[in-house]
Image (cartoon, rainbow, N blue to C red):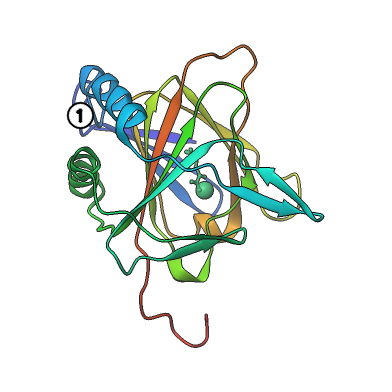
Amino acid sequence: MQSKLFDEADPDYCIRHELEDAALVEYPHALTGAVSAKYLQLMIGTLPWRQDTLRIAGKSIPVPRLQCWMGEKHAHYTYSGIQLMPIPWDATVLAIKHRVEILSGEQFNSVLLNYYRDGRDSVDWHADDEKELGPHPIIAAVSLGAERLFELKKKSPPGSGKYQISLTSGSLLVMGNSFQNRWLHRVPKVKNLELPRISLTFRQILTDIPPSLG
Ligand SMILES: O=C(O)CCC(=O)C(=O)O
Ligand SMILES: [Mn+2]
């Protein structure tokens, strides 16, 4: 179920996606089309994108997208066995972070950027529930480039609660409360898509992790 808040022409306009036991808030016009197009090209051309690999059944498999981990220097992050040390904030990314913090009312000390070079790139089903993110992670994702399908399903019972959101360039999606605990998400491959997609997923890494979560 969706409810629309504010006027559609307003950059603060948002859509609340009510899931059964969590909520996502989408700001379709967080950045203008022109600014988003400029940022997309800047980021593709200037950020030090890394090709990570996953170790699966003794084999090294390239992650099907490029990534960049950025933020404050203590914001270390590990997922799927990949250890990430942040590079310093880039000026364009900082400008986007500022906008995201105003719209969401949340603070972030790091961002995982994903560069899907074409429709062959993707991210598979997962939840961002690593202990560094605390018990109730809030993650704010900005989309740039080609329209991005964002798919959701409940962790249990398996196969329940399927949902999808189409994210356009310049949009912001704020995932809060119990979303990462109860739902999985993915960005699937897209047939015949040659255009790039980028997401900036802003996060707050905890530096003092309570012993009960460590
Ligand atoms: O590209 C996206 O919006 C999702 C990326 C993602 O799930 C992640 O970085 O954890
Ligand atoms: Mn994720």
Residues 177 and 32: in front is 32
Q: Looking at the picture, how far across and down is residue 76, in whole percent?
A: 41, 66
Q: How many marks?
A: 1
Is 6 or 206 nearer to us in this picture? 206
Callout 1 environment at 10 Å: few (<14), some (14 to 19), or many (20+)? some
Could you tell me the amino acid type at mark 1? Pro
Q: Considering the numbered disc 1 on the image, is that residue within a helix, a strand or a loop?
A: loop
The residue sitting at 28% across, 19% down in the picture is: 37
Q: Tell whether 188 sits left or right of 145.
A: right
Which residue reaches farthest bottom? Answer: 211
Instruction: Name the spot of residue 107 as percent of width and height, x first.
Output: 25, 58
Q: What percent of the width, then of the height, locates residue 171?
A: 33, 30
Q: Is residue 170 visible?
A: no
Locate residue 157: give its quadrant: bottom right
The x, y position of residue 165, in whole percent, is: 50, 31
Q: Is residue 17 visible?
A: yes
Q: Would residue 20 be found to the left or right of residue 69 on screen?
A: right
What's the residue at 24%, 44% (across, down)?
Answer: 100
Q: Residue at x 80, y 56 (%)?
A: 58
Which corner quadrant of the image does residue 34 belong to? top left
Q: Which residue is mark 1?
A: 11
Position of 17 relative to 192 (above/below):
below
Instruction: Say if disc 1 is inside 8 Å of ligand 1.
Output: no
Q: Is residue 152 left or right of residue 43?
A: right
Please determine whether, in this image, residue 105 is positioned above or below residue 67: below
In this rendering, the answer to whether 88 lies above or below 28 is below
As rendered, which of 185 and 189 lies closer to the eye? 189
Task: Tell whether 184 sits left or right of 66.
Answer: right
